Image: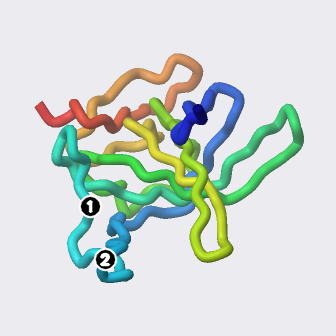
Amino acid sequence: MSLQTMPIDTSQLEFRYHGASEYRAFNKDTEKKEKEQARDENTGYPIYTIRCQVLFRQQRESGLISVRVPLVSPPAEDMEFEQPVTFEGATSKNWNMEGRDGQTWIAKAMTIGNGVGQAVSDSASSSSRKTTKVTADAAA
């Protein structure tokens, strides 16, 4: 037995926002991306691909990744480049297709440094900056 999806401990990683786009699933039957934005099957919220730099300072490593996350509304257009973000409930899944391979990262929630639509606001304990937690349950 092997696990397909692995949980990611993000507590030692730092993420810096580099942009976002609507996620469109790949249709294996048509071999094309879907025209409509994908939605989370549990919440119905639209899924966004968040591009960011990830830093693992302890190992002196960094890289660029994309994380799929359902959001109540898209990230604000005025979000600063390299603004810190965190992900909750992150998992990764390895894939291999036509001689290429990689990892797909998916998260249940994202926390950013400024407001996003109908997100739930929390106070930042380590700074005076307002943080906003964007989750699937935020729109009630």
Up-down relation of residue 58 to residue 75 (above or below)? above
Report the side of 104 relative to 121 (left or right). right
Foreground: 20 or 118? 20
Q: Which residue is mark 1?
A: 38
Please tell me whether mark 2 sits on a helix, a strand or a loop: loop
Question: Which residue is pictured at 43% across the width and 62% down the height?
Answer: 20
Colour scheme of this structure image? rainbow
Please tell me whether mark 1 sits on a helix, a strand or a loop: loop
Up-down relation of residue 138 to residue 125 (above or below)? below
In percent of width and height, residue 10 lies at 61, 31
Question: Which residue is pictured at 58% across the width and 43% down the height?
Answer: 84
Foreground: 38 or 126? 38
Q: Residues within 10 Å of mark 2 (few under 14, many from 20)?
A: few
Report the side of 104 relative to 26 (left or right). right
Question: Which residue is pictured at 24% across the width and 78% down the height?
Answer: 35
**Label at residue 29:** 2
In percent of width and height, residue 67 lies at 50, 52
- Quarter holding the N terminus is top right
Q: Residues within 10 Å of mark 1 (few under 14, many from 20)?
A: some
Question: Which residue is pictured at 41% across the width and 21% down the height?
Answer: 123
Q: What is the CA distance from the residue labelled 2 to the residue labelled 1? A: 16 Å
**Between discs 2 and 1, the one toward the N terminus:** 2
Report the side of 17 relative to 70 (left or right). right
Up-down relation of residue 109 to residue 41 (above or below)? above
Report the side of 71 relative to 63 (left or right). left
In percent of width and height, residue 2 lies at 60, 35
